[in-house]
Amino acid sequence: MRDATPERPAGAGQGRPPTIKDVAALAGVHPATASRALSGARTVSPELVRAVQRAARKLNYRVNPIGRALKQGASGTVGMVVPDIENPFFPALVRAVESALHREGLGLFLCDANNSVRIEAERLDELLLRHVDGLIISPVDAERSAEAVRAAAGRVPVVQVDRTVDVSTDAVAVDQHGMMEAVVGHLRASGRQRFAFITSGEANSPSIERLAAYRRVFAGDPGALARVQVGDLTLEWGAKAAGTLLSGGEPLPDALICANDLIAIGAMQTLRRAGVRVPEDVAIVGVDDTPFARVAEPPLTTVAQPVGQIGDEAVRMLLTRKREPHLAPRRLTLAGQLVARDSTPSQLKLRHS
Amino acid sequence: MRDATPERPAGAGQGRPPTIKDVAALAGVHPATASRALSGARTVSPELVRAVQRAARKLNYRVNPIGRALKQGASGTVGMVVPDIENPFFPALVRAVESALHREGLGLFLCDANNSVRIEAERLDELLLRHVDGLIISPVDAERSAEAVRAAAGRVPVVQVDRTVDVSTDAVAVDQHGMMEAVVGHLRASGRQRFAFITSGEANSPSIERLAAYRRVFAGDPGALARVQVGDLTLEWGAKAAGTLLSGGEPLPDALICANDLIAIGAMQTLRRAGVRVPEDVAIVGVDDTPFARVAEPPLTTVAQPVGQIGDEAVRMLLTRKREPHLAPRRLTLAGQLVARDSTPSQLKLRHS
DNA sequence: GTGAAAGCGCTAACAA
DNA sequence: TTGTTAGCGCTTTCAC
């Protein structure tokens, strides 16, 4: 073989992929009949169905999704917009969605909003233009994404995942309050009493709800309520906020809850470099169970998000809504799972990895 | 404005998006003329062009990519298949590609092969079925992915990125040998002499080439050649291989090169827990500059991949090939960049972050 | 139960 | 320069 692309498997579907006409011709029927046979319509005699199927298999025929899309106005395609593909939570979510979609024969148009509401709106618009059959979106901003989401929801089924805006669409969210209670329970079980929270002030729904949940849980504990620091979801913010704890003149908290793993790790690094022992002096908990958590020193106790379930349910909702467009929007709330590692005292290890 | 989506530009495409017929009717011309006017064909009088453009703008018309795809056999869409979206290198690559494509008005179909050659082949097949205009692929396996890549390359332009198989397509790769020389030079500059390498035996091209590069660089150093351990690209393997170094009875190396950041971090954790000081006793270097590297303790010296460039160049190659299908396949090799952090001695910090 | 015909939106080829 | 025609591949009436 001198050339990397020689003659290619002898004529097999060579230049032009087989169309339904080819199949029909080979089976000796009209294309419409072939179409019906392949789509499992029951108005076709069993013999013909078999003949058509045989012909299709022989030609290695598969429907051209573009022809079908043009005819049906449906493209066999779902659009997904994530706020930030480099936030390690989202690749996991993308994989879950992609896999669930492929199980249903649907393709995924992925767009990354790069944390920008403007880009997000553009991408949604382009996806609609491409006649996606549905959209799965994790909106950048609980307020400013609303308009674009509403516009999209007026055209195709939309499922919001993880992050949500106040637009009536289907949604799959995570129970932030339950998550907070689980974390606090875990820490209290080892005797911790002086709590602090480092979180994000960004306007996305999980951040907002995590803060609300913390405030609710500690409604009777003014100290804990005072020890809240609001920044963003980065390592750097975690480090800086921990610095503030160290230099504040106050005694350190013995339990530090962080709104995500990155904050937790940044804080943990800063505290340890200042000689604070984790978990002996301060127990630290993150959220997301990104791969970082296992890598941290010590490995970080965190709350795993049910990404697989989120993906499955989002796709299921999309399909359900295609069948039943007039159902009331459903909101599904899933539970995260506490993953105990070494950054919290060990008596209550719930799961170890 | 009481409602965010009030009447919408007067009947304009409300239920039904405007078609080129609507534009043509409004402009008082034939649809074909409208099409020509909008596509910038020069056979249309300037007045008509303006009239059509005005009509299009008024109706907020944009071409229906599906109609165009059916007619032209081109979909305005590029497929991308990554071997493992949860490997933190690939989300960065996906973002780069997605952004470069959108700059050109192209959409991205993303597929994840989940490290399986079988899934990879299926996804490629589905993408071809969807009439993608091109494919950007990072093949799972340097051998076993060849057939699927070759089949795809027979149908549409293909650019291989990062990982490659021996099929003549355009490709954007990273110079593994140069990378190894930079790493070794950096370590030798601080006096390190006893080198070891922990790498992956997986059959993807960068892994293969990294091993070859190490062997070439240390061709005259039997000790360094002997201190090679081959496993996979995980934290766990790094930890295990480091354990072997510790228990081998041999003196420890003073410079440990790892094929990626995960291996490096796994190894570093194991060594430090055994009381080995990093970088005083052993300097450690990873590859990829994933976010993990900054998070590690101590922060890890590593080699950043030029993902932004890879994405840009891959898209550029795709477009070039669409225009010039018969050019010889080009292979572009880009350089990584050493990012010195605290896991190697500090005299030669090239960049700090 | 099956074939015929029409048309989704677009544009290339041809005709005027 | 512009309009007409035709057809990409598919499915869905509507006849038979």
Image (spheres, coloured by chain):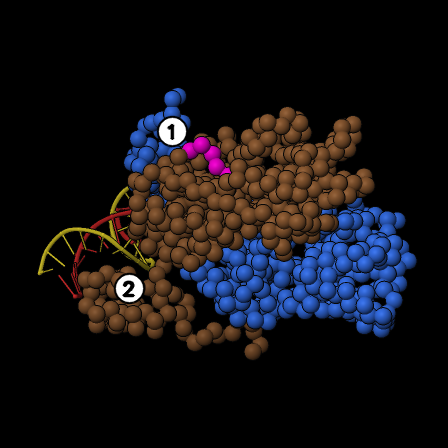
Chain colours: A brown, B blue, C red, D yellow
Residue extending furthest toward the right? B191
Work out which quarter of the rendered image holds the N terminus of chain A and state it.
bottom right
Q: Amino acid at mark 1?
A: Thr
Q: Is residue B34 left or right of residue A274?
A: left
Name the residue that disc number 2 marks. A38
Residue lying at the far top of the rendered structure = B1
| Residue that mark 1 sits on | B5
Q: Is residue B257 above or below residue A245?
A: below
Return the chain for callout 2: A
Binning the other alpha carbons within 10 Å of mark 2 as few (below 14), some (14 to 19) or many (20 upward) gives some
The amino acid type, in three-letter code, at marker 2 is Leu
Q: Chain of mark 1?
A: B
Which is nearer the eye, A83 or A206?
A206
| Front one among B51 and B334 | B334
Question: Which residue is most to the bottom?
Answer: A1
The magenta stretch spans residue B9: no
Which residue is drawn at the image coordinates 33% and 27% (left, top)? B7
Query: Along the horizontal axis of the image, is A31 left or right of A106?
Result: left
